[in-house]
Image (spheres, helix red, strand yellow):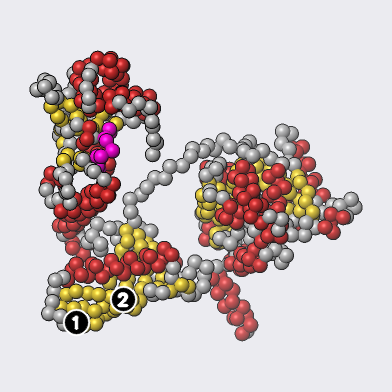
Amino acid sequence: MVLVAHGDERPIWLMYETMNYIHQHFGSDYDWFYIMQDDTYAQAEQVKALVTHLSINQDVYLGRAEEFIGGDEQARYCHGGFGYLLSRSLLLKLHPHLDSCRNEILSVRPDEWLGRCIIDFLGISCVSQLQGQHYHTYELAKNTEPEKEEEEEFQAALAVHPVSDMTLMYRLHKQFSRIQLDRVYQEIQDLQMQIRNLTALTPAGEAGVTWPVGINAPFLPKSRFEVISWDYFTEQHLFSCPDGSPKCELSGASKADVSEIIESAVEQLNRLYQPLLRFSKRQLLNGYRRFDPTRGMEYTLDLLLEAATQKGHSRVLAKRVSLVRPLSKVEIIPMPYVTEATRVQLVLPLTVQDLDFVANFLDMFAMNTLDTHDNALLTLLFIYHPYDAQRVGQVDVFAGVKAMVGELEKRYAEVKIPWISVKTEVPSQVKLMDIVSKKHPVDTLFFLASVWTEINMEFLNRCRMNTISNWQVFFPVHFQEFNPALVYRGEQTASSNTDFLRDGHFDRHSFAEACFYNSDYMTARTKLAADILDRDEVLESMEVFDVFLHYSGLHLFRAVEPGLVQKYTLRSCNPRLSEELYHRCVLSNLEGLASRSHLAMALFEQEQANST
């Protein structure tokens, strides 16, 4: 909310300054302007719905029309207490005459002054209805109880005046929200009845009606691999945990979700059976839920209930109920604008274990970026073991890579591929990035790559689009091909580009690839340094992902990336890294061997061979 002080307490001058301010700051951006007092309650959504039915090209002065005292019987002004609506076209025509109105029109009420100004210079009088749309208002009497107001005039009101205190404002909002909610529920019931009536005339007949009526039918899997599994829960525990453990305590949003769905189930049962029966919950026996992307979250509850009759008799019984929390209206989230013209700085860390894969990486980089003149640069990071660093004068383990870089620079005269040499036993991703960050401008867009990555223009464009300075960083989940020895077992590999996705998986344990701006990394790194002080050993247990997750307020966009494909290789897991990073590397290797069906077939063939 923007608060503006005009520096003048005279009502007419305040209105004059307000109209000037609206014209100067908002006149070119908005089609409609709604002016109200601080003792007015207005239903903003209803006002917004009203203007959608009005023409923006017409001069509109809409509100509660009032007669001028001792003036022309035909002329009307809009009462300021009930708010009024001005169109942009009217505001643009009125603005040149505001100075004349201030000097020539005398009035003690700012709404009367504005109304007289519009009438005298534009010839437009206030109206309460226009183009079939009515501006309904309600004058609130003293000591009114909003909860008890049932008049049609009150329920249809767009604005209520006067509202004497803040508590009354909240009570009015609560009451109008309830009225609007009741209207929505009634509209839903009417639509459901129409759907039932129309479905009976279709070839499927009444059997074609889905439950709940009006919600998409459940997803129908085409194979057993597409079946959506159910998660089991009780009131205390969840038996499908995010960390993979078989049982965890129900807490946070999940606990609130379960409590709300149980409460809603009992409420719906009472709504169906009252006044004959009254249900109260004893216990949740079993709970199941699953997320169906076509319709929302589905629940099945086995409830132990106590049912009481009107005569006071009660009985305990078990009841199974099904509920759906449907997907709500899709909301478009505003995002800063980005383009595909941004230069991408690739950073490739290399160890001795990576030497066999460097040639393929450089070939793919040359073919997909240098040949296509993509706006991308490459920096190599040579990570020397202390022993290799001492012998670099006699035997340089990266001499072959440096020769390949020299050949590329000869082939592409305008290209320079710099390298940075680092000596360390523990190649911490954060420490390495600290070195690279200091050697590049703050507006650099980094793509932290791995030697197994096959660079292509499609992914680089997504890296540019999904990374937004001071807003979002992008951590793609690459596609890892399975071990061909286990998948194909001597047969020919998949030939088409669409088949390869069946022969691998998206490696969710790897955070090696990342797209982010240098300025965002430097900001998060500064906060990390203040937190850990001089304890550099903490950096060995962290990745760049952890830095952004814990020390930045940016959005972390983590998504599968089919354009980022890696050939199978058995990674070397450094035991000197933290236990979590080492364990994650081992899991990545194990899950990257083959699918369950491929592993089962390999075991079956091995047992067959052993038996013979």
Residue under numbered circle 1: 314
- Magenta stretch: includes residue 38: yes
Q: Is residue 147 left or right of residue 456?
A: left
Residue drawn at 27 percent across, 41 percent down: 44
Which of the numbered marks, if any, corresponds to residue 494?
none
Q: Residue 28: horizontal and vertical position, in percent?
A: 36, 26
Residue sticking out furthest to the right: 394
Residue drawn at 33 percent across, 76 percent down: 284
Q: Nearer the viewer, residue 530 or 401?
A: 530
Q: What is the secondary structure assignment of the residue under circle 1?
A: strand
- Magenta stretch: includes residue 380: no
Instruction: Please say if 278 is above or below 368.
Output: below
- CA gap, disc 2 and disc 1: 19 Å
Residue drawn at 28 percent across, 27 percent down: 11
User: Magenta region's main secondary structure?
Assistant: loop
Q: What is the secondary structure assignment of the residue under circle 2?
A: strand
| Sooner in the amino-acid sequence: mark 2 or mark 1 | 2
Residue under numbered circle 2: 302
For the C terminus, which image quadrant? bottom right
Q: Residue 501: horizontal and vertical position, in percent?
A: 53, 58
Q: Nearer the viewer, residue 555 or 38?
A: 38
Residue sticking out furthest to the left: 73
Segment colored magenta: 34-43
